[in-house]
Image (tube, helix red, strand yellow):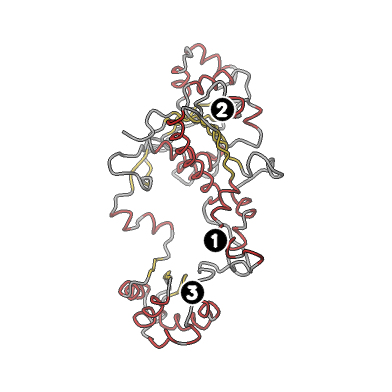
């Protein structure tokens, strides 16, 4: 038995934060009913067509869900929504600011009728405050949370290559929904969860925040290198490839000098005798490391680092990750069905060995509309009338 079997989630979602949250719930067995706009659907369906004709973002965040097309602004939509909520455990929404309340779907509007319902609102900035009504996209939140100020090179900031603010908000929504379900099991009461992308990503920024406390200098932008620990980052090898390595303490520094650089005297060189000193002398130290590494291939460098038990990694691109030996050895890849045929998919991290995660199909737009409405008690003629009226 999967942990969330028997739990029903109704979600008015688009883009990434809410869909990523609800996909995690589906992975654990929840039934997730995704309400989408007729004819168009979640606008993330049209982000690109790189996944064999489907959008890469959509394939990633929407497996194992049921797609119900419903124009939530239509006069006949309210009845459908309330039939859905009558048997739902969780309502998730990341509509535009204030939209859920205008539809009568705020927690305050629903709590008397559905006292066990957990309502999770995901937004850019939260339910109140001066930024409440601002539109929020992932890159904009990366900027507001200060992420861009510490990411990139000295000359130019850089965004994260994936939707980090959306992912942060989605994961906090997911974990708080799990906690709310546990609480409801003890009290019998639902609750409201207010998850903000800004607050989620700012929590992840706490190390640089504390580093810059009381007006201190913030961490500098250091490209792919660590901003405050050195050597920790990318170094080129003689075959044109790049090796990532990282040192955490003075013991590792001494081993690195003796067994990787083959220059044990550098361990006690005053220029490099502490992390603060190495940080200040980055240019000098990098030149010494480059002299050694450029005489070796990347694999030879990694062999030395592994032998010395110094942390290291290949600088992989996406094609390398598709074929990563560790993922293959641990059988982390499976397949899911999609409207474009079978698609490879990663198993979710951390699932216990005594149950299998749910890995059902990525739905076509409106694929489950008729089935869901029939389950709610609508007759075929009723469904046809709703479709003729443009409600579904």
Rounded to the nearest whole Å, what is the CA distance between mark 2 and mark 3?
54 Å
Q: Which residue is mark 1?
A: 207
Answer left or right for 68 relative to 194. Answer: left
- Mark 1 surroundings within 10 Å by alpha-carbon count, few (fewer than 14), some (14 through 19), many (20 or more): few
Instruction: Tell me what residue is drawn at x 45 percent, y 41 percent.
Output: 59
The one nearer the camera, 13 or 170, is: 170
Q: Earlier in the sequence, mark 3 or mark 1?
A: 1
Q: Earlier in the sequence, mark 2 or mark 1?
A: 2
Quadrant where the N terminus is found in the figure: top left
- Answer above or below: position of 104 versus 169: above
Q: Which mark is residue 38?
A: 2
- Mark 2 surroundings within 10 Å by alpha-carbon count, few (fewer than 14), some (14 through 19), many (20 or more): some
Q: Secondary structure at mark 2?
A: loop
The one nearer the camera, 140 or 239, is: 140
- Answer above or below: position of 66 versus 154: above
Rounded to the nearest whole Å, what is the CA distance between mark 3 and mark 1?
17 Å
Rounded to the nearest whole Å, what is the CA distance between mark 2 and mark 1?
44 Å
Coordinates of residue 110 in the picture (x, y in percent) = 58, 25
Q: Which residue is mark 3?
A: 230
Pointer 2 with pointer 3, Cβ within 8 A? no
Instruction: Tell me what residue is drawn at x 60 percent, y 41 percent.
Output: 123
Q: Which mark is residue 145?
A: none
Answer left or right for 255 relative to 188. Answer: left
- Mark 3 surroundings within 10 Å by alpha-carbon count, few (fewer than 14), some (14 through 19), many (20 or more): many
- Residue 54 seen in this snapshot: no
Coordinates of residue 49 in the picture (x, y in percent) = 50, 44
């Amino acid at each position: 038995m999967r942990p969330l079997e028997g739990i029903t989630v109704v979600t008015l979602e688009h883009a990434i934060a809410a869909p990523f949250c609800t996909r995690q719930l589906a992975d654990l067995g929840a039934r997730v009913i995704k309400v989408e706009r007729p004819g168009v659907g979640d606008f993330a369906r049209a982000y690109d067509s790189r996944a064999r004709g489907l959008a890469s973002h959509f394939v990633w965040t929407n497996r194992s869900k049921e797609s119900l097309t419903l124009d939530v602004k239509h006069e006949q939509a309210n009845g459908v929504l309330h039939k859905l909520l009558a048997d739902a455990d969780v309502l998730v929404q990341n509509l535009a600011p204030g939209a859920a309340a205008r539809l009568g779907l705020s927690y305050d509007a629903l709590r008397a009728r559905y006292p066990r319902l957990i309502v999770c609102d995901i937004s850019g900035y939260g339910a109140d405050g001066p930024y409440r009504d601002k539109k929020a996209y992932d890159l904009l939140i990366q900027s507001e949370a200060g992420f861009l100020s510490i990411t990139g090179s000295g000359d130019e900031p850089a965004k994260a290559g994936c939707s980090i603010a959306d992912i942060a908000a989605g994961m906090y929504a997911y974990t708080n929904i799990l906690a709310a379900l546990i609480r409801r099991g003890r009290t019998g009461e639902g609750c409201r969860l207010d998850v903000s992308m800004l607050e989620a990503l700012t929590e992840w920024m706490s190390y640089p925040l504390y580093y810059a406390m009381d007006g201190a200098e913030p961490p500098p932008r250091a490209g792919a290198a660590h901003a405050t620990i050195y050597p920790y980052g990318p170094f080129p090898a003689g075959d044109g490839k790049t090796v990532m390595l990282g040192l955490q303490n003075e013991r590792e520094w001494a081993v690195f000098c003796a067994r990787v650089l083959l220059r044990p005297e550098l361990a006690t060189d005053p220029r490099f005798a502490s992390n603060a000193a190495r940080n200040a002398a980055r240019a000098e130290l990098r030149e010494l490391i480059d002299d050694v590494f450029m005489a070796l291939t990347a694999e030879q460098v990694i062999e030395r680092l592994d032998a010395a038990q110094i942390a290291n990694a290949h600088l992989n691109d996406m094609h390398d990750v598709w074929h990563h030996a560790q993922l293959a050895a641990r059988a982390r890849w499976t397949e899911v069905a999609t409207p474009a045929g079978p698609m490879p998919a990663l198993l979710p991290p951390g699932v216990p060995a005594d149950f299998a995660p749910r890995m059902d199909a990525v739905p076509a737009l409106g694929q489950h509309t008729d089935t869901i409405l029939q389950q709610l008690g609508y007759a075929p003629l009723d469904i046809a009338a709703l479709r003729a009226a443009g409600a579904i």
